[in-house]
Amino acid sequence: MKRYDLIVVGAGPAGLSAAIEAARCGMSVAVFDENTKPGGQLFKQIHKFFGSKEHQAKIRGYKIGETLLAEAADAGVEVFLNATVAGIYLDKEVLVQIGAAMEHFKADTIIIATGAAENMVTFDGWTLPGVIGAGAAQTMMNLYGIKPGQRVLMLGSGNVGLVVSFQLMQAGCEVVALVDAAPKVGGYGVHAAKIARCGVPFYLSHTITKAEGSDCVSGVEISQVDEDFAPIPGTQKHFDVDTICLAVGLSPMSQLLKMAGCNMVDDPRRGGQVPQVDENGETSIPGLFAAGDVSGIEEASSAMIQGRMSGLAAAAYLGFLSEQDKDNRLADLEIALDSLHQGMFAPGNKGKTFTKTDEGIAVSQSLLKKGYLDDADLERFIHRSDQTDEKSGIHPVIECTQNIPCNPCQDACTRGCIKVGKTITALPRIDATISCTGCGMCIASCSGQAIFLVDEDYAPGYASITLPYEFLPRPQKGELGTALSRSGQPLGHAEIIDVRSAKTFDQTTLVTIKVPVEQAMTARFYQPETNAAGQ
Amino acid sequence: MKSINDRSQDIGPFVSQTDDAIIICRCEEITKGEIRQAIHDGMFTVNEIRRYLRAGMGLCQGQTCGKLVKNLIARELNVIPDQLDPATSRSPMRPMEMKVLGNEEVSHV
Ligand SMILES: Cc1cc2nc3c(=O)[nH]c(=O)nc-3n(C[C@H](O)[C@H](O)[C@H](O)COP(=O)(O)OP(=O)(O)OC[C@H]3O[C@@H](n4cnc5c(N)ncnc54)[C@H](O)[C@@H]3O)c2cc1C
Ligand code: SF4
Ligand code: SF4
């Protein structure tokens, strides 16, 4: 038997953060993860994160993972991979399968950070090969470089469904439709807009009624649903697909906590069976903590904060940290966590319908139903602060219209053109009195790819539009292609007049297109000549 | 609140449904109809369904079908799923070979 001050189960963002904090307080820490690679979900997340600087906003998930691993190594954390925790027993004794051996460990504190598993829905043919979870698709693409299929239908319009749809297109798959039984898009509008402008149609109030095929998926049938989510006969639509992706929620993997004897509750808002915990994640068993998705489905950003809180609490529990230091440090983390728990998508607002933003602007119904802002919405949102819009020259246009916890755009513009203010869920505003240099930092920093630079006076009769582009191959200057609208409809020819990439843009390419000036406020994406968007 | 332990409650006869052939537990290939029938045979908890049919006892240990089975029971008993206990969790968490569990090929860390 080997002893540690702290054993952490799960090397995801929550577990690693907990281990780092505890080890920095002087504890001996072991982390077990059943995977061959550490990082949990983080290494699949190739997109830029939301939040604010303290939450590592605008940094891509896998980079955050790399930083955590380096910090864990520095702090002296021992990470065991291919190490499945098989059981937790009385007095914090832990049984771990490492390779082909069963090992026995004991600790004085334990933090469970085992994350969550994907939910499934059943329909005719759902067990056919080709029906996969969105997380599985993400694992195949982003960890192993395997394309899950050619033509994909996505079920689920939460952030996972939206983000993975975009990543599928980045990997070269065609996403034929995004389907959700709910009447409105569940995830962030900016994520939805990113895939709508690539031409992906949204089918809200629809569900899958059948996966077709004998040995594997060859097609899918969807139907409209009524208010009770029952399919309406006669509304079937068919798509030829080889892959059906399900992004219908996650369930906490809380079995180890239950096994240990923690008081459990069934809380649908937290995703299912979760432990009863205090504000630092301590369960009903003193010295046993839960952090991250296992104690309620949220996000990597909050999982990291919760992990750090439980790590500090564990250190204080064993006397490695004075109560006063603990309280001081926890207070800061609570503020950081609280700021993530604000806005329309806050955990406490699950299921609520908002008709107005905090600023009192009517929310875009088109964004919620079709995934993009329609022209009527633009009037309300785009000319918010700059009524004196006679300004010539280049200026940013921000299409971020929901109260989400995010503000890297504000920090990106060193000139101060963009203001979110103290409340990070406030909508970004443009200060038209400050002139924009066109540097493009705001575009590259926007996690939602919602900022564009427009110059109506580029040339007589022509406007230039600079947009974020995250597909390969990168377009070339001088290339001719098609300008697409917010709904992915072709508007006409577009000429690439500039292509910028820089280290500070972190893999986001800034593509500038020249379009007829009438399209200055409608063209929002570029499709290369030979192939469809995203291919 | 209805007591799910009241075995004398009448949940009505088993009436077949058009989608009874759909598989709910992929690992053990148990269908919706089999699970609904088991409930009408008197299996009112997830644990009982597990022992009776092996639903949730396969490779994934009920990670996929646990919620689905629970929802089926809740619907047949006309209770909300949160009122039903999930299956017992016990070691080993994951399916494991006996030779591993018995530490026959030991190479300790
Ligand atoms: C497709 C997708 C996209 C997402 N996008 C974002 C995003 O853009 N921004 C964001 O903030 N969040 C995002 N999230 C959410 C985020 O990934 C999770 O909230 C976060 O990873 C939770 O962290 P965690 O540490 O709790 O769990 P995880 O990251 O899931 O880590 C848990 C770890 O525990 C290990 N484990 C489990 N059981 C055992 C056991 N018995 N023994 C040993 N090891 C075990 C697992 O192997 C895993 O490595 C996304 C999630 C998904 C699925
Ligand atoms: S392009 Fe540069 S100067 Fe203009 S708003 Fe964006 S960050 Fe500010
Ligand atoms: S515009 Fe600002 S607040 Fe909105 S998604 Fe982009 S960076 Fe975040």
Image: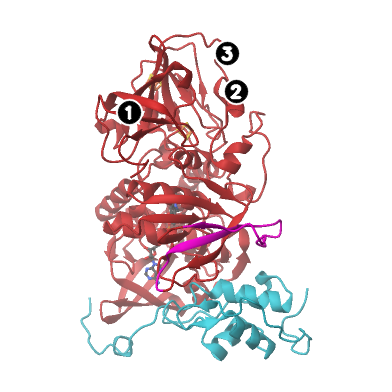
Chain colours: A red, B cyan
Residue beneath label 2, please?
A379
Q: Amino acid at mark 2?
A: Glu
Residue A364 % position (x, y): 61, 34
Residue A298 colored magenta?
Answer: no
* Residue A387 - label: 3
Q: Earlier in the sequence, mark 3 or mark 1?
A: 3
Distance CA(mark 3)–CA(mark 2): 11 Å
- Residue at image position (71%, 83%) is B15
Please state which of the two labelled residues, at mark 3 or mark 2, is closer to the viewer: 2
Range of residues picked out in magenta: A215-239
Left or right of A273: which side holds A474? Answer: left
* Residue in front for this viewpoint, B90 or B48: B48
Query: How many numbered marks, from 0 up?
Result: 3
Can see residue A22?
no
Ligand 2 occupies quarter = top left
Q: Amino acid at mark 1?
A: Val
- Residue at image position (68%, 82%) is B16
Distance CA(mark 3)–CA(mark 1): 27 Å
- Residue at image position (72%, 79%) is B77
Q: Secondary structure at mark 1?
A: strand
Residue A429 % position (x, y): 52, 23
Residue A440 % position (x, y): 35, 24
- Where, by quadrant of the figure, is residue A509 drawn? top left
* Residue A186 - label: none
Residue beneath label 1, please?
A511
- Where, by quadrant of the figure, is residue B19 drawn? bottom right
Please state which of the two labelled residues, at mark 3 or mark 1, is closer to the viewer: 1
Q: Amino acid at mark 3?
A: Gln
